[in-house]
Image (tube, rainbow, N blue to C red):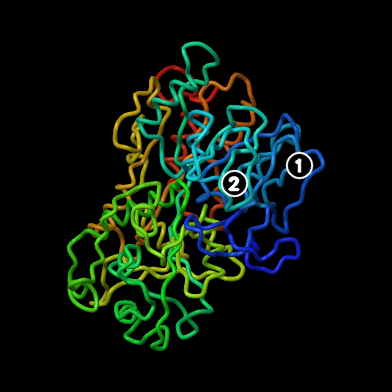
Amino acid sequence: MRKVLATLALATVPAIALSACNGPSNGATGASALPNTVGHVRLRPNDFSALDLHAGGATFPAYGYNLGSQPAGLATKPQAPPGTGSIFGSIKLGGGAQIYYCLVGSGTGRGIFETGSKGQSDGSTATTTGACNPLGATPTGFGARVDPPDFAGTDVAMASTEYAGYKTTREPAVGTNWGEPFEFPVIGGPIVYGYRPRDFKKVDHINLSRWTYCAMANGTVSNWNDPAITKDNGGTSITNGASRPITFYFRSDGSGTSFNYTTHLNVACNAAWKKPYNAAPYESSGHSARWTYGASQTWPGPGSTLVPNAHFVGQSGNPGVLAAIQSTPFGVGYVEGAWAKSANPAVSQAWLGNGKKKNGKPIFVDPSVAANTNASFAFVTAASIQRGMGSDGIPLGSSRPKCQLYIDPSVWNGPIVRGGAGPNAYPIMAVSYLLFYGNNNHLHIASKRKIISYMTGGKAAKIWNNLEYTPLSKPILSAAKASALTDPGDGNGPCVK
């Protein structure tokens, strides 16, 4: 399931800078434009059917959802269906209906689900019925036929402030009432430091200690020949002593990947450093790994509007960051593991230190090994679910709180930092959610219930396991399925009906 991305010389995809379609937010030159479709996907002549479902949102889980096949355009014209063998491509719906999931990012996906529109960084507005733009372009919509969409994906659960907008728009006093939202965690996975292996022929992989990957994120470590990176990799320069400035790619869109990544940095990078990281070549005067920018869905660090830095470049979506890494010598960026694994030309994933030691030596963890990411979620159980809670730590105020299943990121961030997880636990993880309307007014309701049943069952797990994702425990998914299709325990029937 390897996906050909932007840097291949495709006759129909010119090698242009990403300024228009896939461009860095600060105008810097990036990778060539991503194609709208991939080789194993073809357009059907009858794609534009009223039976089809239209959704969108998070790019983090989207390689599993549709193999990154972007259904660019509008529902009234043919759109690219999900890739063969993907989760949405494997769900058989009545009447040959298809699921079209537009990769627009968590913030835009959630905004459209909640109110029907979401403002973009360039001043435009994305809407449910706006065209689904090509991968990496500024989102304009889901490409759906009507509002509201069928569902949405997000790597950040609804916040209490967002729920207020949902109540006004989706549950008005007068007009169609779409009911309380049903929200459930569906999958997890690693956030990795991707880089081009052909730039580092001296090593088979790159080690980055916690101090070093924190210092790369805040701009302190800005060259691959930095003594800290050399120390992490056995004391020999991975660039043969040559100066190789780092170009660091971050998400320019509202991103759950950014939120989970910066949440980790906010916890892990502000701890007291122990030996050997409390002295040169690590923490020293003017050479700090401290993260001072907080956690946010919008990248708050170097390269942002408030913190200009030419070595940091924004890209839209996981596919945009991945394509930029592919095309940039000595580039690096944070990206979801399954996207990095799928890349062709290849993108390697740095082995990250998790703060633990074995025989006195620091442990560096390979994120592509399932046992390592499974260990990271050892603390994520059904008992971790907080029903009705917002991602801002404030209860949503829902009249059916048992229909919103939330897991606080501190459940997996905290234990790893404090040392409670296993020795090979990978340190930077995320969980992704799906959002459905409680009252579907008979709009695709049978298909939606079938999607939820499939996503919480064994068939979806088999697909996730073939990609670089980390399945959640069966009790978590069973709780979600029972809430959606039967009754969450409040006596008001299924959460989705």
Where's residue 41, x and y in %?
Answer: 73, 53
Q: CA distance from mark 2 to mark 1?
A: 28 Å
How packed mark 1 is, by other alpha carbons closer than 10 Å (few <14, some 14-19, many 20 or more), is: some
Disc 1 marks a residue whose amino acid type is Pro
Where's residue 336, x and y in %?
Answer: 48, 57
**Left or right: 268 with respect to 159?**
left
Please tell me the numbered disc located at residue 35.
Answer: none
In terms of depth relative to the viewer, which is nearer, 380 or 154? 154
In terms of depth relative to the viewer, which is nearer, 164 or 464? 164
The residue carrying mark 2 is 459
Disc 2 marks a residue whose amino acid type is Lys
Where's residue 261, x and y in %?
Answer: 37, 54
* Location of residue 237 by image quarter: bottom left
* 207 in relation to 97, above or below: below
Could you tell me which secondary element the residue under label 1 belongs to? loop
Which residue shows up at 32% across the image and 78% down it? 232
Q: Is residue 2 visible?
A: no
In terms of depth relative to the viewer, which is nearer, 417 or 266? 266
* 362 in relation to 467, above or below: below
**Left or right: 372 with respect to 88?**
left
Could you tell me which secondary element the residue under label 2 belongs to? helix
**Which is nearer the N-term, disc 2 or disc 1?**
1
Where's residue 479, x and y in %?
Answer: 44, 35
The residue carrying mark 1 is 78
Extreme residue toward the top, this view: 174
Quarter holding the N terminus? Answer: bottom right
Which residue shows up at 37% across the image and 59% down it? 308
How packed mark 2 is, by other alpha carbons closer than 10 Å (few <14, some 14-19, many 20 or more), is: some
* 461 in relation to 144, above or below: below
